[in-house]
Image: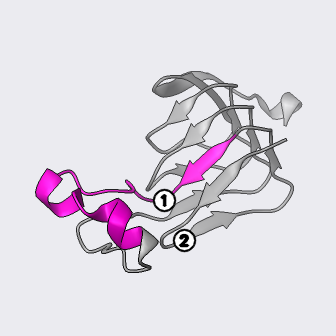
Amino acid sequence: MNGSLIAAQNIEIGDDVLISWGVTVVDHNSHAISFSERSQDVVNWRLGKKDWANVKIAPIKISNKVWIGFNSIILKGVNIGEGAIVGAGSVVTKDVPAWTIVAGNPARVIREIPEDER
């Protein structure tokens, strides 16, 4: 049951959160867009001196009562609202409103979760 939380800055996870297997949560782009700025990344990382200055980084917040389905990917800067559900295999690139179900690549709102299902 593998998954990955990869933080350069901050990944905040609330209470009563279900994270299924294979989920990846990453708060950065890993490498710079410009080849000249990333060309030595692997070599420098192995030497323990990766330069993060040109890598876009933004924190992630996963609120209380969220369920993230298996093999989903949560990307930098995303806030997932309370009680939201992320469908299996989704790629979340934008904020997810509270008490909604999102799915797809990129993830889109499928429906709201009504009061009687919360």
Task: Assess disc 2: are there few (<14), some (14-19) or many (≥20) residues with their C-alpha within 10 Å of its C-alpha.
Answer: some
Residue 10 marker: 2
Residue at x 82%, y 62% (from the top left corner)? 15
Residue 112's spot in the image, x, y percent? Answer: 66, 27
Residue 42 against residue 66 in the figure, above or below:
below
- The one nearer the camera, 45 or 82, is 45
Evaluate whether residue 56 shows in this view.
no
Residue at x 39%, y 56% (from the top left corner)? 30
**For the residue labelled by badge 1, is the local secondary structure a helix, a strand or a loop?**
loop
Amino acid carrying label 1: it is Asp
Residue at x 67%, y 52% (from the top left corner)? 4
What range is drawn magenta here? 23-45
Q: Are marks 1 and 2 in contact (CB under 8 Å)?
A: yes
Residue 60's spot in the image, x, y percent? Answer: 54, 59
Q: Left or right: 58 with respect to 103?
A: left
Q: Which residue is mark 1?
A: 27
**For the residue labelled by badge 2, is the local secondary structure a helix, a strand or a loop?**
loop
Evaluate whether residue 12 shows in this view.
yes
- The one nearer the camera, 38 or 11, is 38
Q: Is residue 28 magenta?
A: yes
In this rendering, the count of numbered labels is 2
Residue 69's spot in the image, x, y percent? Answer: 74, 32
Amino acid carrying label 2: it is Asn
